Image (cartoon, rainbow, N blue to C red):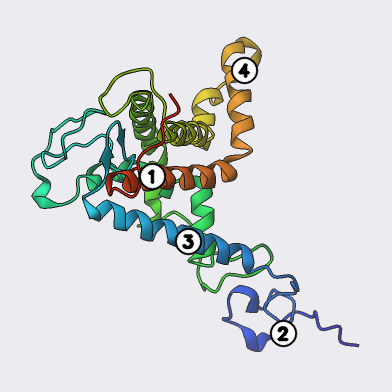
């Protein structure tokens, strides 16, 4: 009696993927009955929304500074066409950047870090490339080469983007410290924007330190943890963060967009920054 799971007959030679002759003969592409497509669809929608927003803000070249806040998309401002700022680093080491937005000079580093991040690889591989779209759901591609060929082989530069991300996080920390000033650059003040910046930098550091590369740098290449108690303790802390890497990736993505949007609202005159003291 046929069970419906016999191997494919020889006539299916040359087939690939789930139709390979070594696989069970099942008419359906998969046997999942749940709404497995919701997760990749939600991931794609979230990432697409951030791409659209960040692209708009990066090319806007306006409304990115309101004393004492500077948008994280534009800090540090490295072009000579940057608006005069006193709230953060203003290193005019490049020319006028041909009239383009100075955000394009700095966003390449945090975006490069996130695009090559292990979680974001999974997110956009599943959400946009369906590789695979979900567990137990086959991908539509006939051939799989992994990250061994161009352009995906460039994912291996993630560890180097991690060092750049540390520098960016340090600069955003400096901007957060300067947010404890008022519009006259006097210390001892706190506004709603200060809390927004504090939340953002906390999540930025948590996401950066939860990176797999950071975990390897802290505790990798050690044969005996007992001989390195300090690194072992740090590795334990980073490992706990690493277990929440997905959550921190999304939270920090939302917080950095929120910080930029808050500065945009202030700079465009939508409202004044509420001051607590």
Give 147 or 166, whichever is nearer the viewer.
Answer: 166
Name the side, left or right, on which 227 lies relative to 181. right
Mark positioned earlier in the residue sequence (2 or 3): 2
Q: CA separation, marks 2 and 3?
A: 26 Å
Q: Is residue 149 visible?
A: no
**Residue 57, label in figure:** none
- Is residue 121 something one can see in this rendering? yes
Q: Residue 45: give x, y in percent of width and height.
A: 50, 64
Res. 176 image quadrant? top left
CB contact under 8 Å: marks 2 and 1: no
**Where residue 222 sits: x, y (%)?**
57, 21
The image position of residue 8, as x and y in percent, is 71, 82
Which is nearer the eye, 215 or 201?
Answer: 201
Label 1, on which residue? Answer: 262
Residue under numbered circle 4: 233
**43 or 255: nearer the viewer:** 255
Q: Which residue is mark 3?
A: 145
Cα distance, mark 4 to mark 2? 52 Å
| Marked residue nearer the N-terminal end (1 or 3) | 3
Which label lies toward us, 2 or 3? 2
Q: Earlier in the sequence, mark 4 or mark 1?
A: 4
Viewer-side label of 2, 1: 1
Rounded to the nearest angstrom, the CA distance separating label 4 from label 1 is 37 Å
Q: Which residue is mark 2?
A: 27
Q: Quadrant of residue 224?
A: top right
- Classify 10 Å Cα crowding around label 2: few (below 14), some (14-19), many (20 and above): few
Q: Earlier in the sequence, mark 2 or mark 1?
A: 2
Q: Secondary structure at mark 1?
A: helix
């Amino acid at each position: 009696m046929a069970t419906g799971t016999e191997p494919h007959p020889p006539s299916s030679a040359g087939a690939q993927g789930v139709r390979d002759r070594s696989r069970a003969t099942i008419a359906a592409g998969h046997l999942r009955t749940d709404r497995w497509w919701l997760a990749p669809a939600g991931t794609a929608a979230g990432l697409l929304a951030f791409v659209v927003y960040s692209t708009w803000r990066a090319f806007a070249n306006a409304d990115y500074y309101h004393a004492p806040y500077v948008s994280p998309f534009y800090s540090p401002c490295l072009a000579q066409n940057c608006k005069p700022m006193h709230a953060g680093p203003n290193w005019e080491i490049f020319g006028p950047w041909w009239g383009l937005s100075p955000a394009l000079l700095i966003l390449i580093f945090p975006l490069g870090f996130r695009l090559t991040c292990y979680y974001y690889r999974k997110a956009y591989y599943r959400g946009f490339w369906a590789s695979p779209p979900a567990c137990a759901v086959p991908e539509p591609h006939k051939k799989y080469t992994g990250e061994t060929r161009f352009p995906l082989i460039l994912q291996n530069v993630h560890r180097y983007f991690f060092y750049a991300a540390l520098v960016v996080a340090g600069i955003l920390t400096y901007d957060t410290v300067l947010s404890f000033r008022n519009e006259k650059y006097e210390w001892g003040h706190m506004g709603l924007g200060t809390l927004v910046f504090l939340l953002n930098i906390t999540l930025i550091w948590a996401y950066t330190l939860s990176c797999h590369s950071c975990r390897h740098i802290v505790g990798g290449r050690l044969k005996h943890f007992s001989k390195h108690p300090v690194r072992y303790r740090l590795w334990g802390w980073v490992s706990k963060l690493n277990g929440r890497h997905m959550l921190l990736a999304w939270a920090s993505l939302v917080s950095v967009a929120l910080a930029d949007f808050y500065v945009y609202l202030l700079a465009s005159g939508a409202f004044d920054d509420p001051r607590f003291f």
